[in-house]
Amino acid sequence: MYTQTLDLKSASWSFNYEDQWLPCAHSPSQIHLELLSAGKIPDPFEGMNEKDLQWIGERCWTYRCEFEIPELDHDDLKTVLVFEGLDTFATVRLDGKQILKSENQFHTHRIPTNLTPGRTHTLTLTFSSALHHGHALLHTHGNRALWNGDASRLYVRKAPYHYGWDWGPVLMTCGPWREVRVERYEGRLVDVVAKVEVTDNLSTATLDVEVETEGGDVVTIQLFSPEGDLVVDGQDVRVGKDGKGRTEITLKDPELWYPHSLGVQPLYELRAVLTSPTSPSTTHTLTRPLGLRRAKLIQRPLKHDAPGTTFHFEINGVPMFVPGADWIPADSFTCRLTDKDYEDWVDLAVRGGHAMLRVWGGGIYESEAFYRACDEKGVLVWQDILFACGQYPTHPEFLSSVEREVKEELGRLRHHPSIVLVCGNNEDYMLAEQLKLEYDPEDTNPENWLKTSFPARWIYEKLLPECVEDVAPHIDYHPGSPWGGKDTMDPNGGDLHQWNVWHGSQAPYQTYPALGGRFVSEFGMQAAPHPRTIKSFTHGMSEGEVYPQSAVMDHHNKADGHEKRLGGYLVENFRWKDDIPGWSYATQLLQSEALSTAYRHWRRAWRGEGREECGGVLVWQLNDCWPCTSWAVVDYEKRAKMAWFTIRRELATISVGVERVEKRDGPEGEKVVKGAVDGQPGQPFDYAEKKVVLNAWACNASLKSVSAILQLRAYEIKSGEELPALRLRKEVTLAPNSSTEILTEIDAEDTDVVYNACLLAPEDDAAFACTSSWPQPFKHSLFPARNVQLTISPDRTSVTVTADRPTKGVWLDVVGDDDRGVNWGDNCLDVFPGDERVVEVEGLEEREVCVRWYGSDFEKDKIFDVYDVPKNLPENSPEKN
């Protein structure tokens, strides 16, 4: 079956600027990238340029593509122009004749056409302003409530984050953002999909293979094992008059796909071949990677009288606590992201201990490279449909456009084993609650929903689940996030967005242990990016123009009230030096303490079968779309913040936790002075008598019991002296796939005492999991003369850290602006007397190493200690000589 595909990426593309045709530098393309490459605008990410570039989104922009098709020795071929995605209001002409109008960024268009070989054909694509179109629709249909962005975005099927969000800029771009190509064929395979069913005992996998063709009668199916061996050879599928056919393949003892935290990721390859009945040597072939797995979202009553229901995932019969992160588009201009960028980002998630990425509903349906990386690296994907923070319309044209969009995108994505959940929206139910819109869960008649003040319920509870059932019935559906309890803040059912820290009541982060839920799908704390990343958007500015409260820093934080909130959390908890390095360090230490506290305690609530009181935690957010201060744990330049390292330790296969709990004297623990705020650290007017007790626990994500020794040590922070009376060792057995309580209400000291808990291997006392509990707030503790020392190995692949006194937040870095290729195996360390913390490092080469810790700003004028040569080298070391 003869087919030919001509990717127009290499054709002659240009764009019109001020009545001049300028060559395009990108294909696919977004107009901001072309203007930037042509030198017509400054970098939108630098300084405050974003403000001066709003005119771009208010104009029409025209692209032109000139191309030829070759002569072929084939008659009667169909010729189709394919547009994978046009952003957003586009009119397309071929040789001056209009062939397409598009109004949805996520629609694919196939336009039959006649092209003459040897002739230069001209495509023109005119993109009118999505902002202006949206305002016209808003004028027609009325204003609707939303959070973030311009109100007109609710009517426009365009990436919502282009309109600006509380972490991203307003950059209303446009263009042919996905592939444009010419297809010529006698017949073609439209699609092949295998719906996988794995038996309960995991012994058999059944593949329900469906094919769809345009022309041709028979499709031959082959299946290759993950090792490349042919498992099924030449199973023919006869196609009906509707172009569709199906067959079934049964595999005994299949190699199963697991998330990386549970196992390996073998991928079979399904190959479909459509052969020409007149020329058997010509074929059209489609391949699909297949991961064979059994994935379920489990929502069932808990045992032991716990209220509500579970919300957790089960993969191949194994219930799992799912740690992860929320994912936003990795750039405001996704056309410049490469496959390597996506691989790097997913690798950062894996190395950070994340087993799930939630593709958030205000971004885009991601690139094939993203999902492929998740398949290959074992990262589960929670896929939001693109509705976010708004009350969306339900007029017929809008619903029709959405239905087509969702079916096309799910059709593109449904074969990926990583995708285990489709979710209807982000925070739309939450907004409906805030507005007190009509929502009666007991009313099951969809026609009634359309008559209420919350008609979009019809989209989330009728249209979208029907799309999923039609296109991807093997993937579970969840109507919204958060959703599932008696309301969206119900901790005992469905998923929860926990924003009482930062948003809402702006509670202290120390209250996170009490703020968990059955599945926390959002929570977060802001932090500044690395000073090198800050330099990337303050290029050319003087030091006097760049300081924590400067206009440019304020511009690069889009959160409402960010200075008050971030500054408030810092003032409550830490001292810091008010320059860019000091601000970056302090905000990152704050974020790392807040997020690791949440992960540590919420993971503890995964207590085994029937007691899955928290089934997963997703931090908002993994990444950024531009360089800024935000909730991301890795900044735009892929530099991991401190929280990335501390979260990773909390998400290790085995982790340990320790907490200090206040026990108050007096009737019912009544405070002596009224008006103190519960949980607020450092309130000076709380004089109640109290004592402190310790609790300790461990979490074991493996499927086997683990023997260990818990070692607990206590130190005076200021002097560094160990308190022998508080030293403890206890043999423990950690239950598989659950948390285990180890110590309960052990008497302890509080003031100026830090506790260090480690799990030791019984055979050699080697520590394999550690944590610490410091008195709160940190600002009240003094950290003089820590005497932090570094020893760099002769081959410069590791750094050993020691300290004479308990030291918080030891941060290793290299000197200068060039940190390319440097990867630290661990960082943001708590170091105790007698410890030798060995940190592996890649790419150090001849770079100097510097170190910072909490309190070093105030210990001496020189904030960074620089170690430019290895210390304590063996006598025969060539570097010592």
Image (cartoon, rainbow, N blue to C red):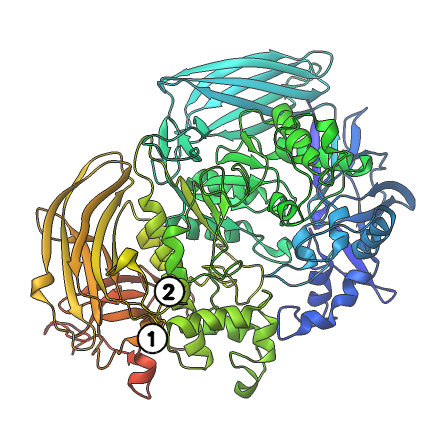
Q: Quadrant of the C terminus?
A: bottom left
What residue do we see at 9% from left, 46% from top? 762
Q: Earlier in the sequence, mark 1 or mark 2?
A: 1
Asked whether residue 762 appears in the rendered view, the answer is yes
Left or right of 837, for residue 197: right
Give the label on residue 822, or none.
2
Across and down, in percent, residue 703 comes to 26, 34
Across and down, in percent, residue 706 comes to 18, 39
Q: Which of the two residues, 554 or 48, is positioned nearer the viewer here?
A: 554
Residue that extends furthest to the front in the rendered view of this protein = 667
What residue do we see at 86% from left, 34% from top? 114
Q: Quadrant of residue 313?
A: top left
Left or right of 467, for residue 814: left
Q: Quadrant of the N terminus?
A: top right
What residue do we see at 29% from left, 36% from top? 737
The residue pinned by badge 1 equals 779
Neighbor class of circle 1 (other Cα within 10 Å; few <14, some 14-19, many 20+) is some
Across and down, in percent, residue 176 comes to 74, 49
What residue do we see at 41% from left, 65% from top? 677
Q: Residue 849, relative to residue 507: is it above or below?
A: below
Q: Residue 346, relative to residue 813: is it above or below?
A: above
Left or right of 836, for residue 608: right
Q: Quadrant of residue 465?
A: top right
Across and down, in percent, residue 475 comes to 53, 29
